Image: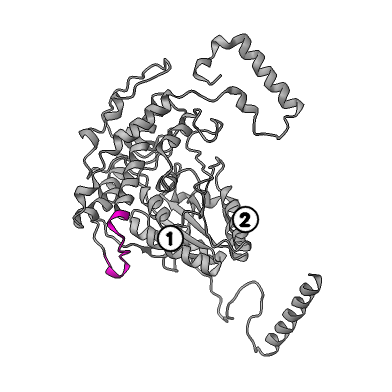
Amino acid sequence: MAYRSSAERVVRMIYQQQQFSSLEDKPQFPGASAEFIDKLEFIQPNVISGIPIYRVMDRQGQIINPSEDPHLPQEKVLKFYKSMTLLNTMDRILYESQRQGRISFYMTNYGEEGTHVGSAAALDNTDLVFGQYREAGVLMYRDYPLELFMAQCYGNVSDLGKGRQMPVHYGCKERHFVTISSPLATQIPQAVGAAYAAKRANANRVIICYFGEGAASEGDAHAGFNFAATLECPIIFFCRNNGYAISTPTSEQYRGDGIAARGPGYGLISIRVDGNDVFAVYNATKEARRRAVAENQPFLIEAMTYRCLPVPTSLPPPHGSLSFHRTCLVAPYRIPFLTVIPLPTLLPWIGHHSTSDDSSAYRSVDEVNYWDKQDHPISRLRRYLEGSGWEELSDHRPVFPQVMEAFEQAERKLKPNPNLLFSDVYQEMPAQLRKQQESLARHLQTYGEHYPLDHFEK
């Protein structure tokens, strides 16, 4: 191995000497590829035109360029629509569950459904997914059961994580979806490592890593981009740019041309797409996947989108009312029912960053309504279905009872046994951890009447 490495160095030195001897007065600096100029000139960021936004459909659901039409079969397009409306309905139920004190936290995906479904549909089911926290639709498209989504948010005995993670931190080994972690951007270098391992193993698979434009400002993003390029890893960096890093608008996040413009500087093959156009997202991700596997190259997709309202105004709401779930949630386990008084504005329905955020502090209702009425991904796909004569097959109302059934099951189930706090940490439990377990047992034995222990498995 040492001999081979030494021989490679010798060959490289000979090649470089020949290269230098044949060149005239051209730059030979190893850090960049460029030409000399004899006039002082700085590159202004606003001189270079912005990266264009690729789209397939216009806002009315009409195909713009027939050559870019993916010509997907009816069954696949209807699955797109069903997945997007199912995710939207689940979001509404779980958002209200948190507002009524039934779960501790939730993050909706309103307005970004097209980025999830379009990208997920273009992947192979064995491709490994590293999500951030707003990619539930990717897992849903891979037929992850509603019952497990609910179980994770409720932290009950059916939760694959045994109730140890906060809500929306999904994960599923069988569906190749790495468990979500709370810190922003930590998944980016991890995904690059997984992609490098896949390359070394000739696994013929791609790694896709999702994040928001806010997370792209984290140091881990820059390290991940650079490693992916220099190691030539088969990875797709998928950035959801919804215009706000929680409450910070993009105008205060960066001065350059968004996230896609950073790609070439790192050596990433990059594209910017209309994230509200599910077909554009599908085409871009499919081609990026094909080339990433064939060429062992990293790709960066920036999907432009927006956190919209829960239900596009162009769609008929299930059962004729947006407030259906305000009155049908039945509280088990002696949890008091929280009366919800309808508010006179649309603010409760805006796609907040999370249930801990009130986006009315930094976004106007008019701004949100504009995106809801003009460019919601579900509305656009719905119009495409209508134009294709598939409207009758796209009835989204049956998904509501399906979600409600999963919700009711999740509420009825017990929480995991408290002793599971101490399992799966070490193969053999150390004395210190055993001492903590015994301390908890004594505490619950003495003060158990102050805790809802009948809600937990024995």
Q: Quadrant of residue 69?
A: bottom left
Count neighbours of disc 1 (C-alpha within 10 A) and say few if under 14, some if 14 to 19, many if 20 or more: many
Identity of the residue drawn at 47% across and 62% down:
289
Asked whether residue 74 is drawn in magenta, I would say: yes
Measured from the top left, where is residue 350 in percent x and y?
34, 38
- Is any part of residue 441 visible from this angle? yes
Residue identified by numbered label 1 = 285
Identity of the residue drawn at 81% across and 74% down:
3
Height in image: 173 above or below 410? below
Identity of the residue drawn at 42% across and 28% down:
410
Residue identified by numbered label 2 = 193
Q: Nearer the viewer, residue 360 or 130?
A: 130
Height in image: 17 above or below 229? below
Q: What amino acid is labelled 2 in the image?
A: Gly
Q: Nearer the viewer, residue 102 or 51?
A: 102
For label 1, the SS is helix
Q: Nearer the viewer, residue 423 or 264?
A: 423
Q: Nearer the viewer, residue 33 or 71?
A: 71
Q: Is residue 424 left or right of residue 240?
A: right
- Is any part of residue 347 visible from this angle? no
Q: Quadrant of the C terminus?
A: top right
Q: CA distance from mark 1 to mark 2?
A: 20 Å
Asked whether residue 95 is drawn in magenta, I would say: no
Count neighbours of disc 2 (C-alpha within 10 A) and say few if under 14, some if 14 to 19, many if 20 or more: some
Q: Which residues are magenta?
A: 64-76
Q: Quadrant of the N terminus?
A: bottom right
